[in-house]
C-alpha cells in the first residue's frame, strides 16, 4: 500500500493534483498493482510531518500560484523539515461558482471560499454578486460542503468539489485572470533520479552585508545556470532576516549544479537543497470524476 497525503479535505485542487500525479500508479493499481490510499491532512505542515514521521510515503502541497505568489506555509515547512521535493505538477486552475440546484443568485447572501480563491475572483464577484458577503473559509472544499447545507450561500470551488457535495455548477471559470496556474510539489524522503530535463530547488541565507546576494548570483552566473525563480521569505524567529528560495534548471547531480552548490557554502550562512526533480509541463486539472479514481478518493486497487 502506497500512502499519499495531501492538503485536504477531499475535493480541493491539491486533492486533484495528487490524483493527477499518480495517474499511472492508479492505472497499475486497477490492474492488480500496488494499491494507493489518499489521505487528507488539515494543514500543509501536517502533510510534511506525516511524511517526515513515516505515516505517509508521499505528500502533495501547493507551492506557488501565478496570481497570488508563493505559498508561505509550504516554503516554511521546506526550510524547517526533512522531506524533499521529488516531483512537480503545474496546472491551470479554474474556479467554479457552485450552489444548490434551487439557488437564485439575486438571493445569495454570501460567497464562501478559501481566501486565495476569493482574491483570484475578486473582479467577477464585484460585477455579478456585489450584494453578497465574501466569507473566507479553510478550503474550497469546506466552502462547497457549507454551501450544500445553505440555500443562501454559494461556493467558489472545483468541479470535483461539486460532485462530492451534490452541487450544481452555476458559472464556470470565474477567475479574473486567464492562465491562472498553481504549481504543486510532491514531497518524499529523497529526490528523484536525473532525467536530463530537471529542476533543482534550494534555499539559502546570506550575511546581512553589502553585496552578499550579488556574490551568490555571480556563482550561478559563472556556472551557466538559469534561475527560474527566486523569492525571499522572512526567517522564523529572526527579525528582519530572510531566506532566499530559488529554482534553477538542472539536477544537483549535474557537474555545473554540484560545483555551484559547493561554492555557495563559502558565501552563504545556510544552503539547503530542497530536491531535484523532473520539470513539469503545465496541464489543466482533471475536470470531473472518471475511471482512474477522480470520483473515488479513498484506497484504490
Image (spheres, helix red, strand yellow):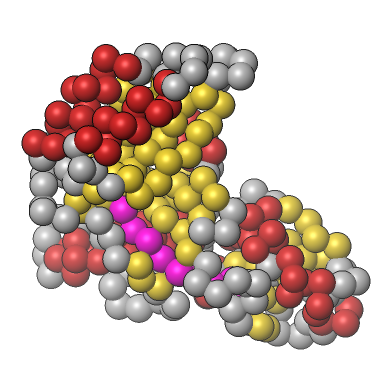
Which residue is found at the position 49% from the left and 14% from the top? Answer: 209
**Whether residue 199 is visible:** no
Q: Is residue 285 left or right of residue 11?
A: left
Q: Is residue 227 left or right of residue 46?
A: left
Q: Position of residue 148 (x, y in %)?
A: 69, 69
Q: Position of residue 101 (x, y in %)?
A: 70, 84
Which residue is found at the position 73% from the left and 75% from the top? Answer: 124
- Comparing 191 with 241, the one in front is 241
User: What are the residue bounds of the magenta stretch?
Assistant: 88-96
Which residue is found at the position 27% from the left and 30% from the top? Answer: 219
Residue 237 forms part of the magenta stretch: no
- Comparing 197 with 268, the one in front is 268
Q: Is residue 40 left or right of residue 133?
A: left
Q: Quadrant of the C terminus?
A: bottom left
Q: Position of residue 67 (x, y in %)?
A: 57, 59
Q: Is residue 272 above or below residue 256?
A: above
Which residue is found at the position 48% from the left and 39% from the top? Answer: 231
Q: Is residue 300 above or below residue 106?
A: above
Per the picture, the main secondary structure of the magenta-coloured stretch is strand
Q: Is residue 45 above or below residue 285?
A: above
**Whether residue 136 is visible:** yes
Q: Position of residue 150 (x, y in %)?
A: 78, 68
Q: Is residue 226 above or below residue 252?
A: below
Residue 90 forms part of the magenta stretch: yes
Amino acid at each position: 500500500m502506497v500512502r499519499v497525503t495531501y492538503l485536504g479535505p477531499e475535493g480541493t485542487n491539491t486533492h486533484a493534483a495528487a490524483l493527477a500525479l499518480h495517474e499511472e500508479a492508479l492505472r497499475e493499481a486497477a490492474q492488480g498493482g500496488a494499491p494507493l490510499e489518499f489521505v487528507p491532512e488539515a494543514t500543509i505542515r501536517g502533510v510534511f510531518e506525516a511524511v517526515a514521521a513515516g505515516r505517509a510515503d508521499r505528500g502533495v502541497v501547493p507551492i506557488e500560484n501565478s496570481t497570488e505568489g508563493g505559498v508561505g506555509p509550504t516554503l516554511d515547512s521546506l526550510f524547517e523539515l526533512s522531506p524533499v521535493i521529488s516531483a512537480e505538477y503545474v496546472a491551470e486552475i479554474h474556479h467554479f461558482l457552485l450552489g444548490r440546484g434551487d439557488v437564485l443568485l439575486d438571493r445569495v447572501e454570501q460567497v464562501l471560499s478559501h481566501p486565495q480563491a476569493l482574491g483570484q475572483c475578486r473582479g467577477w464577484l464585484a460585477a455579478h454578486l456585489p450584494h453578497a458577503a465574501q466569507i473566507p473559509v479553510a478550503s474550497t472544499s469546506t466552502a462547497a460542503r457549507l454551501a450544500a447545507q445553505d440555500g443562501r450561500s454559494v461556493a467558489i470551488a472545483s468541479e470535483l468539489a461539486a460532485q462530492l457535495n451534490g452541487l450544481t455548477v452555476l458559472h464556470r471559470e470565474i477567475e479574473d485572470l486567464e492562465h491562472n496556474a498553481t504549481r504543486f510539489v510532491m514531497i518524499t524522503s529523497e529526490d528523484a533520479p536525473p532525467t536530463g530535463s530537471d529542476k533543482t530547488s534550494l534555499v539559502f541565507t546570506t550575511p546581512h552585508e553589502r553585496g552578499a546576494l550579488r556574490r551568490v548570483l555571480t556563482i550561478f552566473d559563472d556556472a551557466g545556470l538559469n534561475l527560474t525563480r527566486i523569492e525571499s521569505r522572512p526567517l522564523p524567529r529572526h527579525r528582519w532576516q530572510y531566506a532566499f528560495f530559488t529554482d534553477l534548471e538542472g539536477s544537483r547531480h549535474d557537474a555545473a549544479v554540484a560545483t555551484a552548490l559547493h561554492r555557495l557554502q563559502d558565501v552563504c550562512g545556510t544552503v539547503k537543497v530542497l530536491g531535484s526533480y523532473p520539470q513539469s509541463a503545465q496541464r489543466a486539472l482533471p475536470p470531473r470524476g472518471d475511471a482512474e479514481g477522480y470520483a473515488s478518493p479513498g484506497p484504490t486497487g
